[in-house]
Amino acid sequence: MQIEFYGATSGVTGSCHIIHNAGKTILLDCGLIQGRREEMEKNRRPFPFSPDEIDAVVLSHGHIDHSGRIPLLVKQGYTGPIYAQNATADLLDILLQDSAYLQEKDAAYMSKRRKRNGKSMIEPLYTVKDAQEALGNVVGLRYREQKEILNGVQIRFQDAGHILGSCSVEIWLNEGGKQRKIVFSGDLGQYDTPILNDPAVITEADHVIMESTYGDHLHRDRQSTIEEIGQIISDAGHKKGNLLIPAFSIGRSQEILYYLGKYYEEWGLDRWMVFLDSPMAIRASKVYWDYPHLYDEEATKLRKKIKEMPHLRNLRFTSSPEESMAINRIKSGAIIISASGMMTGGRILHHLKQNISHNGSHIMIVGYQANGTLGRKLVDGHSSVRIFGDEYRVKASIHTVGGLSAHADADDLMRWVGSFSNRPQVHVVHGEDASKQAFRHKLESELGLSAHVPVPGEILDL
Ligand SMILES: [Zn+2]
């Protein structure tokens, strides 16, 4: 019985851990490392295990930094089941194919450049076909459905309140009569996130593998965050320029639309045109709409009242590239919600090109921006940035709205881990270094728990 800690032991992307029990091996998440190109290159390194030695894969949720190397795993020989919550399974269908498409596009672009310099071509990390093959192995489970996935291994998904279908995973191990229970937090949400339920209370575990993205940070309270968004929209003024909202396609985009719908009158949104300019976000919104039984109370009430979600009179879904490009002609009065959330790719880059050097434009940053991303540069106040190889002066107003994070803050994390009644050992992962250490210290000093920060490749005997 062992846990091996791998991805997301350094940084917050590429989540991946291994559990050994009675000669069987379970992979917990299989995420893509995201960030700068040099970081992304690490995805090409061989897995620290042989894909054919894995007996089962368990995914906490759909985000690519938790699921994005699944197609690669299957391409390299993994043939077993991939367990995921039902809504996650639907989101994976969108996310993995999109990720594969981006891999193909990126490889083609790089190959073209390399060819000019007489260098060899680059193969995509995986293709859309690889992703489709992997998706064929996904097995959907309901929340709270306990399932024996291997001899001596049972799992149960609990709502993590982070995105639709997100889970904390309870894992019961039995090896020769010895029993251990591991709980993997997955990514935890905030307690008052719209649409989603609060993270579920789990009371028993011997070991908790726990995220710490915001282990040293408190979000602004929700109400002042909502007021801040309203203020930004009103300051932006629909006549002065456009308002760009870079947002993760899954979760954040739906949350923003939910708020725009809820405060439609109050924020004077009838004066604006609202675009959801991301094919993936449009498809994800439809999946959100398909799972009303996973909503919290408020969203359930709203769902009963309206026939279509999101409900905004002047919302346009721009799926095709032509519709997206047509937005470029609008110089003011457009609220453009587009991906990617950290501005590392996607249609948002085209909108940034059009708007970033314009005084009257506004960019509202509503999500986490990892080190090295364009988004982080804007948050850090760089006066000029590079987009598609060209330098642009930043004249648009940049607003960082902190409180909307899909991630629990330090208090939320403490509240969640505080529900365990039997004093588990906590293994702090999925955070920048300072955050992990600060959270470890908090666990020890405030809850008196034994906590440790594993290094990549560390093996823990249970
Ligand atoms: Zn996540």
Image: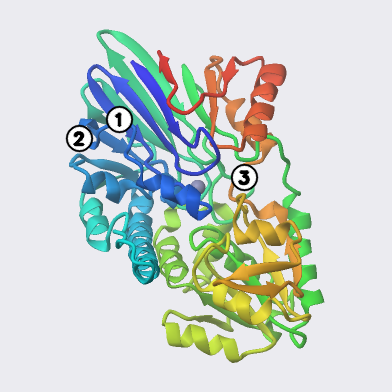
Q: Percent x, y for residue 324?
A: 49, 83
Tag in front: 2 or 3: 2
* Residue 8 appears left or right of 432: left
In the picture, the disc for residue 52 is: 2
The Cα atoms of the two marked residues, 2 and 3, are separated by 37 Å
Q: Is residue 73 visible?
A: yes
Q: Is mark 1 within 8 Å of ligand 1?
A: no
Callout 3 secondary element:
loop
Q: How many marks?
A: 3
Q: Percent x, y for residue 186?
A: 48, 38
Residue in view at x 42 percent, y 45 percent: 42
Q: Is residue 298 above or below residue 236?
A: above
Q: Which residue is mark 3?
A: 190
Callout 1 secondary element:
strand
The Cα atoms of the two marked residues, 1 and 2, are separated by 11 Å
Q: Percent x, y for residue 192?
A: 64, 48
Q: Percent x, y for residue 401?
A: 72, 58
* Residue 293 appears left or right of 241: left
Q: Which three-letter amino acid code belongs to the residue tagged 1?
A: Ile
Residue in view at x 33 percent, y 52 percent: 89
Q: Is mark 3 within 8 Å of ligand 1?
A: no
The Cα atoms of the two marked residues, 3 and 1, are separated by 28 Å
Among numbered discs 3 and 1, the one appearing first in the sequence? 1
